[in-house]
Amino acid sequence: MLRRALLAGSCAFLASPALAKTAPKPVHHPVSRPKIIALDPGHGGPDPGALGVSGTQEKGVVIRVARELQAQLQLGGKYKVMLTRAGDTFVPLRERVARAQEAKADLFLSIHADSHPDPYVRGASVYTLSEEASDREAAALAARENRADSVVAKMVAQPDAVAKTLVAMTQRGTGNDSRRLADTIVNTFGKGGIRLLPHTHREAGFAVLTSPDIPACLVELGYLSNPQDEKLLTVYQHQMALARSLRGSVDAYFSQSAATKKA
């Protein structure tokens, strides 16, 4: 009887509310969602973009690089990728921004291949949004890209709209994030052996970069007006190298962001 009483007491003690309160709760680690990357191959449809010395069309080069980058980013499940245009179609600039915003993109990369009056000019470059262009060439490039559709003409005619976007970007820190992304791309391209334009990171008023809450860069992969760049941009191995470098840039950008948050 004594033995039974002791056993009953032990069970009652183990089941007591006081002890139950001290039991450790299971730890639930939050599962991070894949980052959403918006890739924007420039031009398309009736707008071929820049034309190479041998007739290469910018719109074809940039969508091939964008698709290769999409495939590389989606390996491993860290990223989800959306294309602002998946085929040879024309998408207005403002619609490209809207599609990225609708997808709740974490990053926006507009991919282009430029031309230049001087056929000796060659190399990749990166652009971020600014009300004042960093130089005449950046201003001229932005003007050319912004003429891609008639919607932009209305936007350029309304400086208040652009100013409001720039203020919003500054308030949210998006502009700083865009510049950090641009610096990361320049660094990764350099390490990957991608030829760079001098003063590689430039700024101008690109309409396609005006989302106030998505860090964004416009990447010029090279100059189709230069015979060497044009040839490289049509070679699959070089397109893969560009995509690999851009994938490395995206990885480095988010690694820096995570380290900044922990600090």
Image: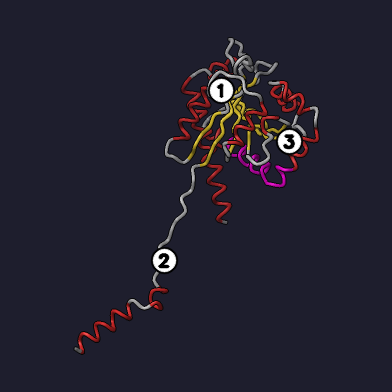
129 in the magenta segment:
no
**For mark 2, what is the residue?**
25
Count how many numbered circles sit on residues in the image. 3
Residue 182 in view in this figure: yes
Tell me the magenta residue range: 168-185
Q: Residues within 10 Å of mark 3 (few under 14, many from 20)?
A: some
Q: Looking at the image, tell me whether mark 1 or mark 3 is earlier in sequence order.
A: 1
Q: Which mark is residue 130?
A: 3
Magenta region, mostly helix, strand or loop?
helix
Q: Nearer the viewer, mark 1 or mark 2?
A: 2
Q: Looking at the image, tell me whether mark 2 or mark 3 is earlier in sequence order.
A: 2
Question: Horizontal and vertical percent for residue 92?
Answer: 66, 24
- Labels 2 and 3 touching (C-beta < 8 A): no
C-alpha gap between disc 2 and disc 3? 50 Å
The residue most toward the front is: 1
- Labels 1 and 2 touching (C-beta < 8 A): no
173 in the magenta segment:
yes
Asked if 193 appears above or below 10 in the picture, the reply is above
Question: Horizontal and vertical percent for residue 125?
Answer: 63, 29
- Name the quadrant of the C terminus: bottom right
- Name the quadrant of the N terminus: bottom left
The residue under label 3 is which amino acid type?
Ser
Q: Nearer the viewer, residue 184 or 101?
A: 101
Q: Looking at the image, tell me whether mark 1 or mark 2 is earlier in sequence order.
A: 2
The residue under label 1 is which amino acid type?
Val
The residue under label 2 is which amino acid type?
Lys
Image point (51%, 37%), residue name? 248
C-alpha gap between disc 1 and disc 2? 52 Å
Asked if 24 appears above or below 190 in the picture, the reply is below
- Labels 1 and 3 touching (C-beta < 8 A): no
Q: Which mark is residue 62?
A: 1
